[in-house]
Image: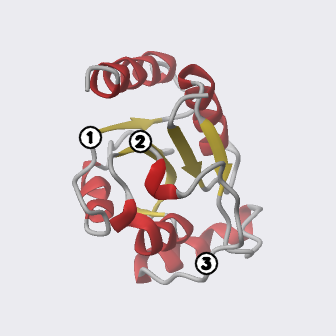
Amino acid sequence: MSNILCVYHSRTGKTRQAMTAIAEELDAELVELTDGLDRQGKLKVVPACFDAVRKSTRPLEPFRTARPITEYDLVIIGTPIWAGRCSPVIREFLKKYGSDLRWSAYVLTRSSHQRYEEVCRQMDQYTAAPHLQWVSLQVGEAGEAFWRAEFIRQLRGIVYAG
């Protein structure tokens, strides 16, 4: 296993799908994050978006990693885009651990055609250093596999060159 950690939150399973593929390609550890709220189903999307807009968070449910967060060379963070923001679960992870990350990269999953580059800047507010790389994916849509592969290629070039 590489010294890469992939963490993500997924309401519909699309972010899980993207992050699983990325973790497999990079031989990375994969961890799903949750705050214990049931956000499944169509009726739960509205409160989820309100939480994202208000930047409200709740404590994360306990999760395990093979080593302390500070010991990973790279942490790849996967989040769905809700109302133009990262999910509250990922915001809470960044608030708690962002300053401990050596290097980070972002995987944004979305349902619209907008790429949401500004979400990266929002997430960088919680990290010690700006992200190294990012990708915005429409899971299941044309081009997803290409952009995911390009993201992985670029990360390999950065991580294994240093």
Q: Position of residue 67 (x, y in %)?
A: 60, 51
Q: Quadrant of the image for the N terminus? A: top right
Q: Position of residue 35 (x, y in %)?
A: 67, 73
The amino acid at mark 2 is Leu
Mark 3 lies on residue: 47
Query: Cα distance, mark 3 to mark 1?
Result: 31 Å
Asked if residue 90 lies left or right of residue 84, the reply is right
- Distance between the alpha carbons at the discs numbered 1 and 2: 9 Å
**Residue 125 at least partly seen:** yes
Q: Position of residue 64 (x, y in %)?
A: 70, 58
Q: Residues within 10 Å of mark 3 (few under 14, many from 20)?
A: few
Q: CA distance from mark 3 to mark 2?
A: 32 Å
Q: Residue at x 59, y 83 (%)?
A: 58
Q: Who is closer to the viewer here, 137 or 122?
A: 122
Closest to the observer: 149 or 98? 98
Disc 3 or 1, which lies upstream in sequence?
3
Disc 3, disc 1: CB below 8 Å? Answer: no
Q: Quadrant of the C terminus?
A: top left
Q: Amino acid at mark 3?
A: Pro
Type of amino acid under label 1: Leu
Callout 1 secondary element: loop
User: Is there a contact, CB below 8 Å, between mark 3 and mark 2?
Assistant: no
- Residue lying at 42% horizontally and 80% vertically, measured from the top left: 55
In the image, which disc is placed on residue 74? 2
Tell me the element at label 3.
helix
Considering depth in this image, is 27 or 116 the residue closer to the camera? 27
Mark earlier in primary sequence (3, 2): 3
The image position of residue 103, as x and y in percent, is 33, 46
Residue beneath disc 1: 132
Query: Which residue occupies 42% across, 83% down?
Result: 54
